[in-house]
Image: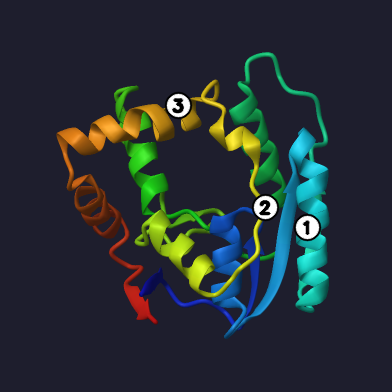
Amino acid sequence: MIKIQGKLDRSIYVACSGGVDSMAVVDFLKNNHEVTLCYFNHGTEHGDKAFEFVEQYASQNELGLLYGKTNREKDSKESKEEYWRNQRYDFFKSLNAEIITAHHLDDCIETWIWSSMHGNPNIIPYRNGNVIRPFRLNKKKDLRLWAYVNNVPHIEDDSNLDTCYIRNYIRHNFMPHVKTVNPGIDKVIRKKVLKYDTDEKPTNVN
């Protein structure tokens, strides 16, 4: 069962990378909503190939598609991850609409762990400007299961396995140890998600 937070408009915009998480969210939402995909090309080797995939999917399913790409050089003070995130959110904020992302509970856990290591434990908020994250109560495996059961196509980005990026290092090398120390970490963070967003009640959807 997939849970969403907040009420969504009939016509919606969804950030779509072509990966399994965002493709599962798109497939889930397009059953009851008019969906426009928002693809951002980070200028990586994977970017053009992923855009071709998303573009073909949008055409086959008669979905709208908006395209964005990097428009400046990386600042020397930015890590690659910061640069890509800043550019992606600049694109989202340039759109005159709410943008739905596929952030899930596992993302919230990783962000909380990461930010805690820097002394400021942080929960990914439901809203950041015009960007909303209504799927944070779902585990990644829930989205993967939806994709598997419904035969949802997706494209894998090999860089997601590269642990030179901090997010990937935490995901692949650190999180297994966290879950050994506290197997119930997902329940802990889920309570924090609900606590900090009491105005966005979850809705159960089969």
Q: Mark 2: few, some, or many residues within 10 Å (few <14, many ≥20)?
A: some
Residue 130 seen in the figure? no
Mark 2–mark 1 Cα distance, whole angstroms, equals: 7 Å
Q: State the residue at coordinates (32%, 34%).
A: 175
Q: Which mark is residue 169?
A: 3
Residue ID for mark 1? 53
Mark 3–mark 2 Cα distance, whole angstroms, equals: 21 Å
Secondary structure found at label 3 = helix
Of the residues shown, which amino acid type is indicated by label 1?
Phe
Question: Picture coordinates of residue 173 (x, y %)?
Answer: 38, 27
Of the residues shown, which amino acid type is indicated by label 2?
Ile
Question: On the image, which quarter does residue 36 sit in?
Answer: bottom right
Question: Picture coordinates of residue 90 (x, y %)?
Answer: 69, 44
Q: Mark 3: few, some, or many residues within 10 Å (few <14, many ≥20)?
A: some
Q: Camera-side residue: 117 or 6? A: 117
Q: State the residue at coordinates (76%, 60%).
A: 54
Q: Camera-side residue: 188 or 7? A: 188
Question: Picture coordinates of residue 139 (x, y %)?
Answer: 36, 57
Of the residues shown, which amino acid type is indicated by label 3?
Tyr
Question: On the image, which quarter does residue 6 sit in?
Answer: bottom left
Q: Earlier in the sequence, mark 3 or mark 2?
A: 2
Mark 3 touches mark 2? (CB < 8 Å): no
Q: Nearer the viewer, mark 3 or mark 2?
A: 2
Mark 2 touches mark 1? (CB < 8 Å): yes
Residue ID for mark 2? 155
